[in-house]
Amino acid sequence: MDDRIKVLISEDEIKSRVAELAVAINADYRGKALKLICVLSGAVLFMADLVKRLEMDVQIDFIHASSYGAETKSSGIVKITHDLKTPITGEHVLLVEDIVDSGNSIHRLKKHLLEQKPDSLKVCTMLDKPERREIPGITPEYIGFSIPNEFVIGYGLDYNQRYRHLPFVGVLPKELI
Ligand code: IMP
Ligand code: MG
């Protein structure tokens, strides 16, 4: 690992926070069936850790959205590039994201999923950068960590498709951007 990368959230901190989120989700959906939708690619590590701790009747599916623009900032134009395998009409759905930044991706994804009329739709994000919100009213129901306005990598998050495999969340120093 490049030692210029500063650890913001350690592997242990992630582990215990994921366990707490699972407790809350288990309580809220007890006795119900839940479909988790993992937003590719960033939420893959979070999703894998979270789903192992869920106790209700669980199904998983995947969706991919791309936003085109500068590399460390989303452009606001969000396109669905890979859609769900199975319909979600009448189901309880939890959208699992890596990070909510401007809110554009979640806004677009929620709109898209609500067209199918799920019974309920909530958002669970590992990280939230509330300071950066451009779309008002985008507040994920489950948040792992609220973080300051810094570009982070690791635990699924990338910079130019690299660093996703790191087991912690780190800050990428300016000289590596
Ligand atoms: P939003 O549409 O601006 O909310 O951005 C959401 C997407 O942008 C996330 O799902 C990430 O893929 C990416 N993103 C936003 N902030 C960061 C960051 O700090 N590091 C890596 N990716 C990020
Ligand atoms: Mg993402």
Image (cartoon, rainbow, N blue to C red):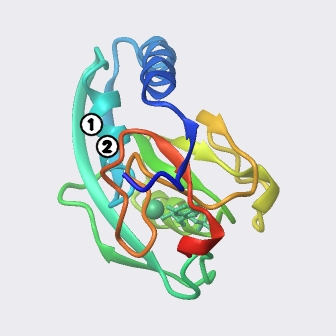
**Which amino acid, mark 2?**
Leu
Residue 91 visible to the viewer: no
* Relative side of 39 to 10, left or right: left
Q: Name the residue tied to disc 2.
A: 45
Q: Residue 10: horizontal and vertical position, in percent?
A: 50, 31
Residue contact at pointers 1 and 2, CB within 8 angstroms:
yes
**Cα distance between the residues tagged 1 and 2:** 5 Å
Residue 73 in the image: above or below residue 84: below
Q: Which mark is residue 165?
A: none
* Relative side of 50 to 73, left or right: left
Could you say which is closer to the camera, residue 118 or residue 23?
Answer: 23
Question: Dot 1 lies on which element?
Answer: helix
**Which amino acid, mark 1?**
Ala
* Relative side of 165 to 11, left or right: left
Q: Residue furthest left?
A: 85
Which residue occupies 37% across, 59% down? Answer: 163
Q: Name the residue tied to disc 1.
A: 48
* Relative side of 58 to 21, left or right: left
Which residue occupies 53% across, 48% down? Answer: 170
Residue 35 visible to the viewer: yes
Q: Residues within 10 Å of mark 2 (few under 14, many from 20)?
A: some
